[in-house]
Amino acid sequence: MTRKLALLLPLAMMASGAFAQNVLINGAGATFPYPMYSKWFDEYHKKFPTLQFNYQSIGSGGGIQQVTQGTVDFGATDGPMNDKQLMDFQEKRGNGVLHFPTVMGAVVPVYNIAGVTAQLNFTGEALAGIFLGTITKWNDPMIAKANPGVNLPGNDIVVVHRSDGSGTSYIWVDYLSKVSKDWETKVGRGTSVNWPVGLGGKGNEGVSGQVKQTPNSIGYVELIFARQNKMPFGKVKNAAGVFVEASLASVTADAAGAVKEIPDDFRVSITNSPGKESYPISSFTWLLVPSKIQDATKKKAIADFVKWMLTDGQAMATALDYAPLPKPVVAKELKAIAKIQ
Amino acid sequence: MTGSLLLWRRKAVNIAMLTVTGMCTVVAAGILIFILGYLFIHGAASLNWNFFTKLPTPVGETGGGMANAIVGSAKLLLIASFIGIPIGFLAGVYLSEFGEGVFAFAVRYVTDLLNGVPSIVMGIFAYTIIVLPQKHFSTWAGGIALGVMMIPIAVRSSEEFLRAVPKALREGSMALGASRAQAIFTVVIPAAKNGIITGVMLNIARVSGETAPLLFTSFSNRYWSEGLNQPTASLPVMIYTYAVAPYEDWHQQAWSAGFVLLTLVLGVNVFARLVLARNRHVAR
Amino acid sequence: MGITFLCAFSILAITAYLVWELWINSVLPRHQFGFNFLRTQTWDPVAGQFGALPFIYGTLVTSAVALVIAVPLGVGSAVFLAELAPPALSDALAFLIELLAAVPSVIYGLLGIFILVPGLRIIEPYLKAVLGWTPLFSGPFYGVSLFSAGVVLSVMIVPFIISISREVIRAVPNDQREAALALGATRWETVWDAVLPFASRGIAGSIFLALARSLGETMAVTMVVGNDPKIKASLLAPGYSIAAVIANEFTEATGELYTQSLIELGLVLFALTVIINGAARLMMAASERGKV
């Protein structure tokens, strides 16, 4: 035991003493923007070596919860906080929380159907029906109608959804709520919901793994994820009635369609927004920053980072397959930084 | 005729059942060999020096390591040992030397309960009593969660080894005029030293692989954790996050980390059990 | 000497504090749902409906599957090691098997995701061909399931059963064996009729201890159970366990009621393990007394 202590102590001291002037800022939340954030925080650390942004991707629900409890300095989420969550935050912390959109992403339906290689078209009603459990066979007319010429099998559909609280789920069910009254009343919106059918996978990885390995299954993952893993994903019918494939361009188009109505607190859903080229299941992803930060060093570091992220940082987005923010949003956010106090 | 048939059947059953038990053993032992082999092939293949010296890199950049997680695990175990071992050991002394009556029964019973507390529940406990009031995740919180988990095992193993010390030793030293306390601390405990050290090592090895209590206490950290008030990376949590993440490169790192962790844990086990075995042999 | 008493006392204090913390931090769901928390099946964070039954069910079923596999395997090995194997081989194998108990849970999970689940997909058609007529093995199989979790758990608990049972069987007095052999019993009959009945309480105790362990197992189960809070008859369907839902949702739960419901689940799990541990202790104590 003593020998073990003698071995460990110097290690512990080294880790505690050597970097005393560093500032560590903890953040947690959404998994979808994690590659982007880890790149940004790494670049920012290289620029300012004493600033360490420690971001852990525990899920959007976790981001909201932990920033509300005050256990992390900032949160991150793919679904904006709802009014009740904002009230909880106000009650617990005595101040508000600011939403800063960082980049945009899309959620796509991925599927694995034996013998089908064509890219499938999905209407919103069909997706809602499948996830509600009212459409159970692949050759259901609701699906077949949108896919003339594709020979769909009569097998049962296996639905795969996220098991963890997830912003990806939020975007997905937010879209389903907009296109289906049934979905809105029976299930509703949230980072985790009571799924009527299907099995759960943890994370994008869990869902795509299930879909890949389960014949006749359908699930939903982030566009980047589907691309990196070379999974087939379907086109989705947008509000203008066009089947659109998700891409950085169609996501940006979707945001442009919604940009006029962006409120001052940036809490806005851009799913199913108008425009012929819009991909309908798109969303911002947000940083959650408390409006009041006691520690002056941390306050400055976070405010400076947000500013850098909106300017230099945006230029790195496309290289990592994220859609950068529309210019008017950036301009509006730069003004909002002053609200961090 | 029927008699010999019966005998034949009895013999056949005998051989069949004995074979079945043998096969059970082969399966059980085979699983371990398989696990070790698989981890060795998968983990060692992608293991390199960077793993021990570098910090994790951002997603998509290769070449990072888990140096901070290794140090983090060491710090967590250090705190845990400082909490769990003295309390557990001294309570074990109490039970072995004065362990009669209702109070001792209660302590033994509750120690068993504490040992049975699922590790995830221990995580909730540390989160509500340390992380929430302090408003931040910390190495302390994780270390304390692990430390509480160490207590019951420390109690049990030290009590057992102290009890194994022959009565004659105690009585002899007390006959020579030593007080009860002197007898315990100068004669009994030194006599049980090997066993106690073995227990301590196995205890540390056991909690070193615990993941669930750390998820919401020590959290994780991309960088070096300074002091004990910051969240820290640790090997088991890194294995978990890297295994369920969608990046092939991370899966490789998870295997490497799994290999390193398993080698450490099993190494300590083999070493400690060989000491233990030698000790037992002498005692008999 | 006071300090040793103090340390012993602190164990009582810590445990009491733990139970107290869990209790006061789960007032809301108790207040709102009462016993229905344990009886209802809906787990709907959006609507604020929390029923624990699917998790309790999943926890018990995965542990049951684990026992069905691990008990014959474990007791069989213990018999072989204690009664048949030459002592040197027995010690070496027992040593190896005890090492299995030391492998961290997260590593079992790692192996579970990347080896066991793909492996079960290959075995599944054969499993169904043999057992598919029962509702337990009907329906589609996706790889992750209650059954997969049970298999991982069985590997994790088998070492406990083997090492304790082996000790217990070894401790059976030799007269028992000699008497049976002298009456002309075969080796197996001796074990079955004379040794095992003598050791049965100790073996049962080891099984309860293993059960307590598997109920609270978290990481490995989370990684392979499928994480779906529904109660289905088939073992091949995905399920959920108490420990897994806490690990998945605790840092993510938004709102007091949700968090507190998870803490109450923790309390339920604690209560379950307390009961099982108590039973194990009683069995072991009875077996000690039986030995004389």
Image: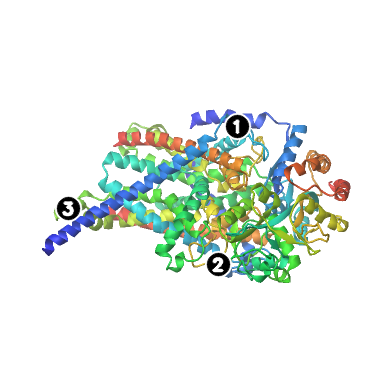
The amino acid marked with disc number 1 is Ala
Q: Can residue C31 be seen here? A: yes
**How far from the left and from the top, in percent, is residue C290?**
29, 56
Residue at (36% x, 52% y) in the render: C74
**Residue B138, image quadrant:** top right
Q: Can residue C168 be seen here? A: no
- Label 1, secondary structure: give it: helix
Depicted C161 relative to depicted A195: above or below: above
Residue at (84% x, 49% y) in the render: A326
Residue sitting nearer the eye, B136 or A52: A52
Residue at numbered disc 1: A12
**How far from the left and from the top, in percent, is residue B86?**
50, 39
Depicted C68 relative to depicted C112: above or below: below
The amino acid marked with disc number 2 is Leu
Residue at numbered disc 3: C181
Residue at (51% x, 35% y) in the render: B44
Position of B62 compared to B36: left or right? right
- Whichever of callouts 2 and 3 sits on the residue coming sooner in the sequence is 2
Around disc 3, counting alpha carbons within 10 Å, would you say few (fewer than 14), some (14 to 19), or many (20 or more)?
A: some
Q: Which mark is residue C228?
A: none
- Label 3, secondary structure: give it: helix
Around disc 2, counting alpha carbons within 10 Å, would you say few (fewer than 14), some (14 to 19), or many (20 or more)?
A: some
User: Please, which colouring scheme is shown?
Assistant: rainbow
User: Numbered disc 3: what chain?
Assistant: C
- Label 2, secondary structure: give it: helix
Around disc 1, counting alpha carbons within 10 Å, would you say few (fewer than 14), some (14 to 19), or many (20 or more)?
A: many
Q: CA distance from mark 3 to mark 1?
A: 62 Å
Q: Which mark is residue C38?
A: 2
